Image (cartoon, rainbow, N blue to C red):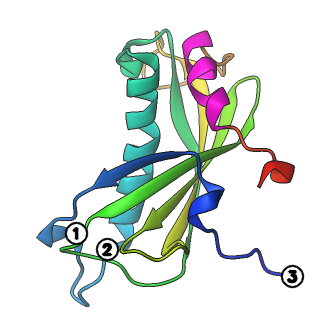
């Protein structure tokens, strides 16, 4: 059984982003790498705004442990894109996000990303960083985005 195509009602927080000429590939639709940039921006912009702090400076930071994307239809320049954000799971040291991309008036997502942050010690260098619990301010910022499967 396939997962149904997500709709606007599946997401909690919203942000509109502009598209740029360079975002399109040679075929005239959004380049695959740009989808992942939009996912990263939707998550981190929410964290910056909801915490009121530069999350890069916290004692522990979220690093991307997993990403994925389901593509449903083409999107691209020059129309803006609305990103919808929801949290599927908040663990001791990780968060699982879903990000829907919408362009135009339609109710169904053009794409949906999966984005997993795992929190690590920010005091360590780029080498081996131990996994640590979520910072309290991050947990507080993402709990309002949590949507249990039965809430949909």
Q: Residue furthest front?
A: 105
Q: Magenta span has 140?
A: yes
Q: Are marks 2 and 1 in contact (CB under 8 Å)?
A: yes
Cα gap from disc 3 to disc 2, whole angstroms: 29 Å
Cα gap from disc 1 to disc 3, whole angstroms: 33 Å
Which residue is located at x 42 percent, y 45 percent?
Answer: 42
Taking the image as shown, residue 56 lies to the left or right of residue 77, namely right
Give the residue number, with chain letter if any, for mark 1.
23
Helix, strand or loop at label 1? It is: helix
Residue 90: x %, y % from top left = 73, 32
> Which segment did they paint magenta?
136-145
The circle on residue 31 is: 2
Magenta part, dominant SS: helix
Residue 128: x %, y % from top left = 56, 24
Residue 13: x %, y % from top left = 51, 43
Q: Magenta span has 139?
A: yes
Taking the image as shown, residue 46 lies to the left or right of residue 64, namely left
């Amino acid at each position: 059984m396939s997962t149904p195509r997500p709709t606007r009602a599946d997401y909690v927080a919203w942000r509109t982003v502009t598209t740029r000429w360079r975002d399109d590939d040679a075929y005239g639709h959004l380049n695959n790498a740009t989808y992942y940039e939009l996912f990263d921006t939707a998550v981190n912009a929410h964290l910056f705004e909801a915490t009121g702090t530069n999350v890069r400076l916290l004692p522990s930071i979220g690093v991307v442990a997993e990403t994925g994307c389901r593509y449903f239809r083409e999107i691209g320049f020059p129309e803006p894109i609305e990103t919808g954000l929801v949290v599927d799971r908040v663990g001791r040291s990780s968060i699982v996000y879903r990000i829907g991309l919408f362009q135009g008036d339609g109710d169904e997502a053009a794409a949906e990303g999966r984005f997993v942050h795992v929190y690590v010690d920010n005091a360590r260098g780029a080498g081996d960083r131990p996994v640590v619990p979520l910072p309290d301010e991050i947990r507080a910022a993402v709990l309002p985005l949590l949507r249990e499967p039965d809430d949909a």
